[in-house]
Image (cartoon, rainbow, N blue to C red):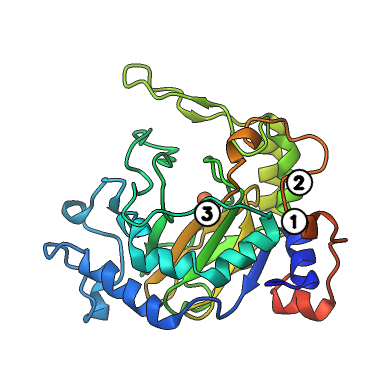
Amino acid sequence: MSLNAEQIGFFKTQGYLLVPGAMDVDLCARVRDEMWAALPDSVALNREDAATHTGPFADEESSDDSILFRQGHRWLNRALGVSETVIDLIYSERISAMAEALLGGPLRQAVVDGSPMGSEGPAWPGGPTDPALANEGARGVYCTLPYGAKAREPDACHTDGHPFQLGVVGLIDDIPEDGGAFKVWPGSHRRLYPTFQLRYDQPRIPYYAHLPSFKGIVHTDAYLEEIEALNETVTPVECWGRAGDIVFWHHRLAHMAGHNYSSVIRQAVLADFWKLELDQYRAAPPDGDMWRDWSGAVQNNDGGYSEAFAARQRLPD
Ligand SMILES: [Fe+2]
């Protein structure tokens, strides 16, 4: 088995699982090269000059293209999500086997040179934007520039709107603590799952330019109350680490892109896994056993793990 019972138990109870050293570091380096190569020459951000790495992007260097996005401190390349390098990296045999240990199979397969996330669909002005249509690969390479002198901000968690079952974030460069790494709210998947109306999807209000007051995802009051309670009472876990480290996370786990108070750019690959049956699962009600669509190994696991394991997973006491 690619994941042991303790790893599976921890994931089931806490909704995330750190797996250090799961990705090929040479491929990580190649993805970093491709990320920089895709940056237009007109942008002042320069790989060789760390003094240029602090955000935000100047207005004239920003891009609201959802495929090649640069705005504020965020630098996202979704085109790379369908590159052979990124797909080899994040959908490797090893990582896919771990995803299958959690989900069962068969899993949907990524398509090299397919349509990247954001190729079509509702890129709504002002957000919440969830340009997830036509996603045939990984989500892409997501970077956060150092905040520099920007004032500290509180953490605020959310869940993702588009249908999938299991997320993964892979660090393609070393990221220190407080350096903008992915943050997860342990155990929140079990609290949030029953507050949704649909198992792996959610109702939305379309965006109309002439009727701009309502748009996007419709949340239940129970969900909004739970998110508020999570922000107030649960200490998030920060998934910093070395190039090659990954974290798996449950679709309904509360999370955020961390704030980057370090001096280095946070660089990560984000990708999703789901079973071929997702289209049947997604609009079913979230009643009964929340693991019914997952592997037998997850369903039969009692959710237990040792204190030492929890400490290695950085779970707060
Ligand atoms: Fe998110």
Which label sits in the foreground, 1 or 3? 3
Residue 299 lies, in percent from the top left, at: 81, 54
The CA span between labels 1 and 2 is 7 Å
Q: Answer above or below: position of 225 versus 69.
A: above
Give amino acid for label 3.
Asp
Can you identify the residue that label 2 sits on? 191
Q: Residue at x 32, y 17 (%)?
A: 210
- The picture quadrant where one finds residue 273 is bottom right
Report the Cα–Cα distance between label 3 and label 2: 21 Å
Q: Is residue 69 visible?
A: yes
Q: Residue at x 41, y 63 (%)?
A: 87
Q: Position of residue 220 (x, y in %)?
A: 66, 30
- Answer with mark 3 or mark 2, whichever residue precedes in sequence: 2
Q: Residue at x 38, y 62 (%)?
A: 141
Assess mark 2: CB under 8 A from ligand 1? no
User: How dense is the environment of label 2, judged by Cα within 10 Å: few (below 14), some, or many (20 and up)?
Assistant: some
Which callout, 1 or 3, points at the residue further toward the start of the chain?
1
Residue that badge 1 annotates: 187
Q: Residue most toward the top?
A: 210
Percent position of residue 249, x then y? 62, 58
Q: Residue at horizontal 21%, vertical 64%?
A: 39
| Amino acid at the residue labelled 2 | Arg
Q: Kindly indicate whether the residue at mark 3 contacts the one at mark 1 (C-beta within 8 angstroms).
A: no
| Quadrant in which residue 125 is drawn | top left
Estimate the spatial distance between the alpha carbons at disc 1 and disc 3, rounded to whole Å: 19 Å
Is the residue marked by circle 3 packed among few (<14), some (14-19), or many (20+) residues within 10 Å? many
In the figure, is residue 106 to the left or right of 126? right
Q: For the residue labelled by badge 1, is the local secondary structure a helix, a strand or a loop? A: loop
